[in-house]
Amino acid sequence: MLDVDINNTVSGNAKKSLQTILDAMELKSKTLRSLEISTEEDARKLFESVFYARKHFSDVISKTSIPELSSAFSQLKDPSLSYSERVEKFKSIVKGGEREDIEDMAKEIIHFLEPEKYPLWTRWIWNKERGTGSINYVIKDDVKINDEKELFSTIDELRNVLEIFGLESKGKYYVTSVFLVYAYVRYLDYTTHLAVDKKAAGLIPTHLSTTALVLGLKPYLKVIKLANT
């Protein structure tokens, strides 16, 4: 059983930290919905909104033109396409970068474009090929997820459970995203603490801070901080 996480932001106030993260997610969604890619700087903003995709920007921009990136992003916004079609079209247009990261990037962007309809699905939440991911921490040991439909159904169940315990979704999948990424971060934190000296472990970022980082919220948290000063 996991101990209470005392390593939280906002002076140890976990609820306030969570609300700040949810506010940043709302801002990220708003920003992505309004983003149009017509320049390299626009493309950079898109990649900077996805934590693990930033490192691929130089490689992608050297192999994919701005019109192509604009087209790829438009595919993710197209409501006439299914979830899988959007992801596949984005992957086929965007050249360069690690393919797994580009696929996860597409899925994360879809989540933030339509958080009311699509939950976050990256390979650390559920890796289809390996059957691994943080979703396994919340399902019964004898239950196995086989496809996208079963994953989304499981996340729906998780959302209902979280609402019972007072974490209101307000019709969106933000809370489940935070929960699943947080579970992944805590697992990594546990394994890291086993591998490093305790003094060095004290330098590891807090769990909620790392969760926000993995969700690509750092730029939006800065905006919120400035707005409140």
Image (cartoon, rainbow, N blue to C red):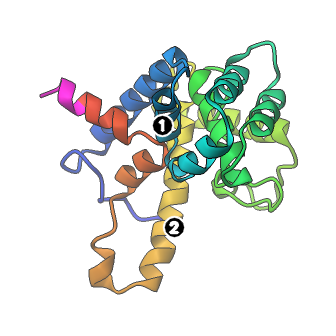
The disc at residue 143 is none
Instruction: Give the quadrant of the C terminus.
Output: top left
Q: Which SS does the magenta portion mostly show?
A: helix
Alpha carbon separation for disc pair 1 and 2? 22 Å
Q: Where is residue 154 in the image (x, y as percent from the top left)?
A: 73, 40
Q: Which residue lies under the disc numbered 1?
A: 49
Residue 178, above or below 205: above
Residue at 60% x, 32% y is 109
* Mark 2 element type: helix
Which quarter of the figure has residue 91?
A: top right
Q: Between residue 22 and residue 82, name the one nearer to us.
A: 82
Magenta highlight on residue 74: no
As rendered, which of 184 and 109 lies closer to the eye?
109
Q: The residue under label 1 is which amino acid type? A: Ser
Looking at the image, the residue that sits furthest to the right is: 146
Amino acid identity at mark 2: Leu
Q: Dots 1 and 2: beta carbons under 8 Å?
A: no
In this view of the protein, which residue sits in the foreground, 81 or 170?
Answer: 81
Q: Is residue 140 left or right of residue 7?
A: right
Badge 1 crowding class, 10 Å Cα cut-off, few under 14, some 14 to 19, many 20 or more, is: many
- Residue occupying the point 70% across, 28% down: 68
Q: Where is residue 110 in the image (x, y as percent from the top left)?
A: 65, 28
- SS for tag 1? loop
Nearer to us in this view, 66 or 79: 66
Q: Is residue 96 above or below residue 81?
A: below
* Labels 1, 2: front one: 1
Image location (x, y in percent) of residue 223: 28, 29
Q: Is residue 1 visible?
A: no
Which range of residues does the magenta coloring cover? 225-229
Q: Report the disc number at residue 188.
A: 2
227 in relation to 62, above or below:
above
Q: Residue at x 51, y 19 (%)?
A: 35
